[in-house]
């Protein structure tokens, strides 16, 4: 997924979360009006990577287009 394009997603990543972690994830998702848990996780990964100095290309606001790489869709930046 070098360009942040959802059409190129061919890998599945499975993670296990505690009940508390899932609650925090869902709180973030609903507060930011994210379309899915997967979109919220990709957004959090993108933010974490950006905080460490990793940046890349833009993307849209459909769930399939929320990527770890790219800019946050308008209204989703939490600012």
Image (cartoon, rainbow, N blue to C red):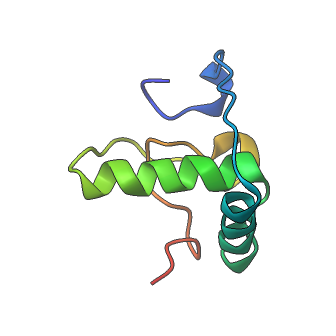
x and y percentages locating residue 51 in the rendered image = 28, 58
Residue lying at 50% horizontally and 35% vertically, measured from the top left: 4
Query: Eyeballing the image, is 49 above or below 4?
Result: below
Q: Is residue 75 left or right of residue 71?
A: right
The quadrant of the rendering that contains the C terminus is bottom left
x and y percentages locating residue 18 in the rendered image = 71, 52
Residue lying at 34% horizontally and 41% vertically, measured from the top left: 56
Query: Eyeballing the image, is 79 above or below 52?
Result: below
Residue that protrudes farthest toward the bottom in the picture: 79
Along the line of sight, the residue nearer the viewer: 56 or 46: 46
x and y percentages locating residue 26 in the rendered image = 75, 66
Query: Eyeballing the image, is 3 above or below 36?
Result: above
x and y percentages locating residue 15 in the rendered image = 66, 35
Query: Is residue 60 in view from this perspective?
Result: no
Residue that protrudes farthest toward the left in the picture: 53
Query: Is residue 23 in view from this perspective?
Result: yes
State which quadrant residue 11 falls in. top right
Along the line of sight, the residue nearer the viewer: 31 or 25: 25
Residue lying at 66% horizontally and 15% vertically, measured from the top left: 10
Q: Is residue 63 left or right of residue 71?
A: right
Residue lying at 55% horizontally and 54% vertically, measured from the top left: 43
State which quadrant residue 34 falls in. bottom right
Q: How many marks?
A: 0
Along the line of sight, the residue nearer the viewer: 42 or 13: 13
Along the line of sight, the residue nearer the viewer: 12 or 55: 12
């Amino acid at each position: 997924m070098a360009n942040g394009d959802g059409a190129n997603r061919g890998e599945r990543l499975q993670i296990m979360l505690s009940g508390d972690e899932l609650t925090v994830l869902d709180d973030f998702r609903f507060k930011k009006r994210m379309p899915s848990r997967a979109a919220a996780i990709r957004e959090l990964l993108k933010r974490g990577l950006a905080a460490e100095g990793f940046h890349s290309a833009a993307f849209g606001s459909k769930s399939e287009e929320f990527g770890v790489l790219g800019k946050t869709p308008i209204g989703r930046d939490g600012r």
